[in-house]
Image (spheres, rainbow, N blue to C red):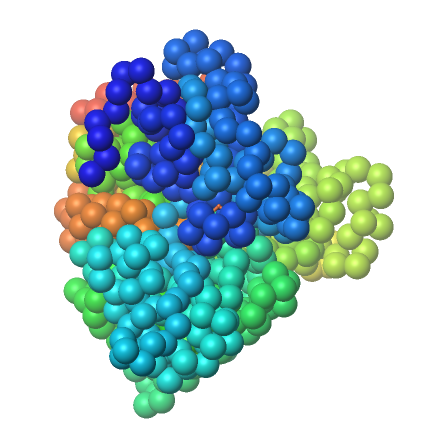
Amino acid sequence: MNPPPNITDPLVLFMPSGKRGRFPKGTPVLDAARQLGVYVESVCGGRATCGRCQIEVQEGQFAKHKITSSLDHISPVGPKEERYDRVRGLPEGRRLSCSATIEGDLVVDVPQDTVINAQVVRKDADTRHIERMPAVQLCYVEVEEPDMHKPLGDLDRLKAALVRDWGFDTLDADFHLHADIQRLLREGNWAVTAAIHRDRDTERPRIIAVWPGLKNEAYGIACDIGSTTIAMHMVSLLSGRVAASAGVSNPQIRFGEDLMSRVSYVMMNPDGREAMTKAVRQAVSELVDKVCAQGNAHREDILDSVFVGNPIMHHLFLGIDPTELGGAPFALAVSDAVSCRADDIGVELNRGARTYLLPCIAGHVGADAAAVTLAEGPHRQDRMMLIVDVGTNAEIVLGSSKRVVAASSPTGPAFEGAEISGGQRAAPGAIERVRIDPQTLEPRFRVIGSELWSDEPGFADAVSGTGVSGICGSGIIEVIAEMFLAGIISEDGVVDGALAAKSPRIVQTGRTFGYVLSDGEPRITITQNDVRAIQLAKSALYAGTRLLMEKMGADRVDAIRFAGAFGSFIDPKYAMVLGLIPDCDLDAVSAVGNAAGTGARMALLNRSHRREIEDTVRRIEKIETAIEPRFQEHFVNAMALPNKVDAFPNLARHVALPERTQSPDSGASGAPRRRSREERAARRSRS
Ligand code: FES
């Protein structure tokens, strides 16, 4: 036990964690960090050879902390650091915390990029700082040579050295190491680096891999298995650096575009489950090859892995038949987090590599939603945060530190362009942005692949390669919201046929009217059926959200996060005009495209995040929207634009919503009922 700190001992503050404590002069900075629970990497065990324990001293007066920190308050560079600097190079201002000792008050910065090679922060990974406490640690040790008089086995002497140098109480070892340990120890001349896995404090630490000599880098992979795309990051377990990122289309698409058709495929084909499991694992394996090539690493360097996905992807990846998820009561085979060896699920990494899958929230709200929850942290804050992942099945999480609820809502594929006459997936040539002049009703738009608006010079040339091929989800949201703002559709979503007299863009299609958005080839018309399809989809999402708000006793939300690829392209303003999401300060609405990947990285780099999300998911209340009596009522109200009863005061500050008039049927809520000339005309057009 350490003696209690003396008030005259130097005070040391570690940043960015803010942890502080007093330590006797002469204490190595690394020891002080360890005692305070500040994570500073160390592979060589303080031999000043790995360079992983680098820190920086901040100089100056830190009045808030009552600390005057100075370079004089840390020991001068000693021979070990000098040698490291000579051989490997130490960046300006950096010290090795295993060698440098505390000699006075200090503010110590633990750089988050403690890497030896030049690092590249990849744009496609969220660059947020994730405090590290990985489940796998590299420990260099020098092992006693064999002695005839002490017949302890090689593996046992390795364990003894690890206990001696690294403070483990006891250790287990993976069986596969037994056959290799003698060769490895001799190859390393009795010095080896062991990878120790310990996910939970209640587990015995376990040796999962051994390399001769000093091994100074190890990786983990964080992978989001989406039904359309699989995305993977390879991350240094020692520095947190994202070394490589890659994505690939989910090859299961050939068995069915959407999730339910994949479940049907399993039900209809005897080998369906096996074929789909094989396909997704094969794709994961190809991604491992890609990230290894990109990050200049080998599969053997990957020691840990975290996977997230919706419940059906999660089950198929694990080799579980997802049939039960195809219908009520949507029973998951396993909802808790899954920990196993990577080779148990056919992922070929280091032989001892481990795998962790985040828990699933419910039969329709998966480990991907859990990862987004971990990344965005509604459970860590006081404000009421709404997270929506818009897909065929929208996943909705709402809550704050007090309580979190979750549900899914069957939005259908309309937001992905399906069921829409001119709809298509987001790809070059698809209309993604739309504006309509309320006077002339003339549109202008932008397509994916060009920055130019359709009324700007050069547009035709810019899109000559792709043409204007259709409209994708974000474009559909914008065009319908703009049609509403321009008075082309009423709050009930009816296209005003009377406007055909004013604009050739309003055309009759059978018994209803449509709006010609693009009159090129193909001609893209937003039909009455298209508007209906979007109304149904948005009503399902909004009704689910409203139901959750009701459960929480909340009449407003403070922040909204759009997760998923689709969410990245939605303009919050138009989503609100459409009534896809409840009213909220527009500045507090944002897209968090790769939040599931960020959550997976958090679980990879810090095992306490695994406990955090396991605990949070256990506490999340799951609401089954289909059996809630109020769902229908919310759904019907949400069919109107933006909503029949709910007010949108924040939105009204940014957008001139069509005039609302009080009507006798505004209901007990007293919310004004919008009744416009467009609606009256629409009624005429319906009759
Ligand atoms: Fe390895 Fe300091 S712990 S250099």
| Most foreground residue, 280 or 109 | 109
| Most foreground residue, 131 or 418 | 131
Q: Is residue 521 visible?
A: yes
Q: Residue shown at 60%/47% (left/top)?
A: 84
Residue 151, x across and y down, in percent: 27, 79
Q: Residue shown at 29%/47% (left/top)?
A: 608
| Most foreground residue, 523 or 242 | 242
Q: Residue shown at 34%/76% (left/top)?
A: 147
Q: Is residue 123 visible?
A: no
Left or right, 234 with reference to 618: right
Is 321 rendered above or below residue 479? below
- Of all residues, the one furthest to the bottom in this rendering is 270
Q: Residue shown at 75%/57% (left/top)?
A: 467
- Asked which quadrant contains residue 227, the reply is bottom left
Residue 277, x across and y down, in percent: 39, 78
- Of all residues, the one furthest to the front in this rendering is 149
How many discs mark residues in the rendered view? 0
Question: What quarter of the picture does the N terminus occupy?
Answer: top left
| Most foreground residue, 265 or 76 | 76
Is 473 rendered above or below residue 452? below
Left or right, 676 with reference to 433: left
Left or right, 243 with reference to 353: right
Question: What quarter of the picture does the C terminus occupy?
Answer: top left
Residue 671, x across and y down, in percent: 28, 23
